[in-house]
Image (spheres, rainbow, N blue to C red):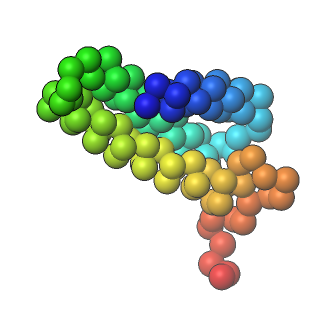
Amino acid sequence: MVAGLVMAALALLAGAGEAFFRHIPREANRTLVLHISSMLTAFACFLASVALRKQMPPSNLALALSGLGLVALLAGGWFGGTLVYRFGVGTALSAPDPTSKSK
């Protein structure tokens, strides 16, 4: 779990660079804020869970924080996918127009 937190910290730094230096469409700002908030919440939950796992078996609070971190991670992944597939963030091609009715 500690190795996962180290990799998550690196991913958070890379994501912050992307958000700061890359052009983000205005309509994607709300989704970007939700993505960042979800991922930071997941990181904080997992970090707190690791800090509480000094005893075996882990406390109920440590397990609950891991579960909450998982939910936040899944939500953040959903929002990240929306940024890419709906708004075209991080792609070379422009995203499809979300207001278009064609399929």
> On the picture, is 46 further left or further right than 3?
left
Is residue 63 in sight in this rendering? yes
Question: Residue furthest toward the front?
Answer: 56
Up the image or down, 43 lies above or below 96; here it is above
> On the picture, is 85 further left or further right than 30?
right
Q: What residue is shown at x 30% (from left), y 26% (from top)?
A: 49
Give residue 94's quadrant in the image.
bottom right
Q: Quadrant of the N terminus?
A: top left
Question: Residue furthest toward the right?
Answer: 92
Q: Where is residue 97 in the image (x, y as percent from the top left)?
A: 69, 65
Q: What residue is shown at x 28% (from left), y 41% (from top)?
A: 67
Question: Residue furthest toward the bottom?
Answer: 103
Q: What residue is shown at x 27% (from left), y 32% (from top)?
A: 65
Q: What residue is shown at x 37% (from left), y 29% (from top)?
A: 46
Q: Nearer the viewer, residue 42 or 36?
A: 42
Q: Nearer the viewer, residue 42 or 59?
A: 59
